[in-house]
Amino acid sequence: MKLRAGREGVTERPQDRAALLRLVSLLLQYPDADLVAARAELDRAVAVLPDTHPRQALEQFLWWFRDRQPMGLARHYVETFDLRRRSSLYLTYYLHGDTRRRGMALLTLKQRYRLAGLTPPDGELPDFLPVVCEFAALAGPDAGEAPLRQHRKGLELIRTALHDSGSPYALLLDALCAMLPDLSAAERAAVADLALAGPPAEEVGLAPFGPPLNEMEVRP
């Protein structure tokens, strides 16, 4: 994939793209004690990136992230991603809803990881956005970022929902979407339709959309 130089000030160097994707992956995860303790290290990692739009978005997010108490961060994360369907981080839902096609999409994504020599973490679905970003960082801009491009409309819906709710996490989606191709007019119309109507509905025994129940139970 070749982005136009300067579209959003996005760097073309693969190592910089990988670093940005890893940072987005980390910062989109639940803010547990380890992540909170790494705030100074995350600041340093962002500071050495090229001065681009994605880096600036990450810097703005970290200004908010480092000034919040751990309990407040945890509460905001759960309210934002676990309790709001429009801003959940499970990508295949936006494309397929709770249909049979979603189950096949999850299986295909898991197989894609395994072909690249990677194994998704236990207890997490392969379409969880931090997992997809980590795969993109490890596998490179072509094959690695393909799932992000495939789910570009879903990413835009999440980004819009986060902006609508006023969540600073919108900055992370701004950074991520700036690294991907722009949406066409038709795709933007499809995003608007999806926001109004929601994804396809066909209950077939899949787990409800959102984080696994056992994950929600252990969070404070």
Image: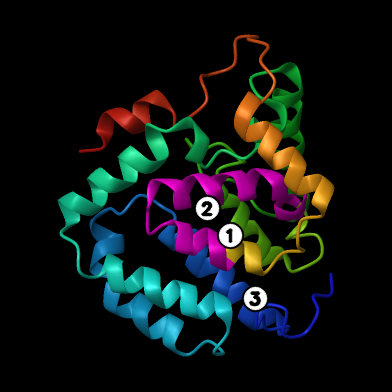
Determine whether 32 is above or below 75 in the image: below
Q: Which mark is residue 153?
A: none
Q: Which residue is mark 2?
A: 130
Q: Which residues are magenta?
A: 147-175
In reply to whether residue 18 is colored magenta, the answer given is no
Residue 198 shows in this picture: no
In reply to whether residue 150 is colored magenta, the answer given is yes
In the rendered image, residue 76, in percent from the top left (x then y), is placed at 28, 47
Three-letter code, disc 2: Pro
* Label 2, residues with CA under 10 Å away: few <14, some 14-19, many ≥20: many
Is mark 2 in CB contact (under 8 Å) with mark 1? Answer: yes
Three-letter code, disc 3: Arg
Instruction: Please state which of residues 124 and 45 is positioned toward the viewer in this rendering.
Output: 45
Question: Toward which corner of the image does residue 195 lie, by quadrant?
Answer: top right
Determine whether 204 is above or below 165 in the image: above
Disc 1 or 3, which lies upstream in sequence?
3
Q: CA distance from mark 2 to mark 1?
A: 6 Å
Q: Which residue is mark 1?
A: 134
Q: CA distance from mark 3 to mark 2?
A: 15 Å
Q: Residue at x 38, y 74 (%)?
A: 60
Q: Is residue 189 found left or right of 33 in the rendered image?
A: right
Q: Is residue 135 found left or right of 78 in the rendered image?
A: right
Instruction: Please state which of residues 8 and 213 is positioned toward the viewer in this rendering.
Output: 8
Is mark 1 in CB contact (under 8 Å) with mark 3? Answer: no
Disc 3 or 2, which lies upstream in sequence?
3
Local SS, label 1: helix
Instruction: Please state which of residues 120 and 31 is positioned toward the viewer in this rendering.
Output: 31
* 1 vs 3, front mark: 3
Q: Which residue is mark 3?
A: 17
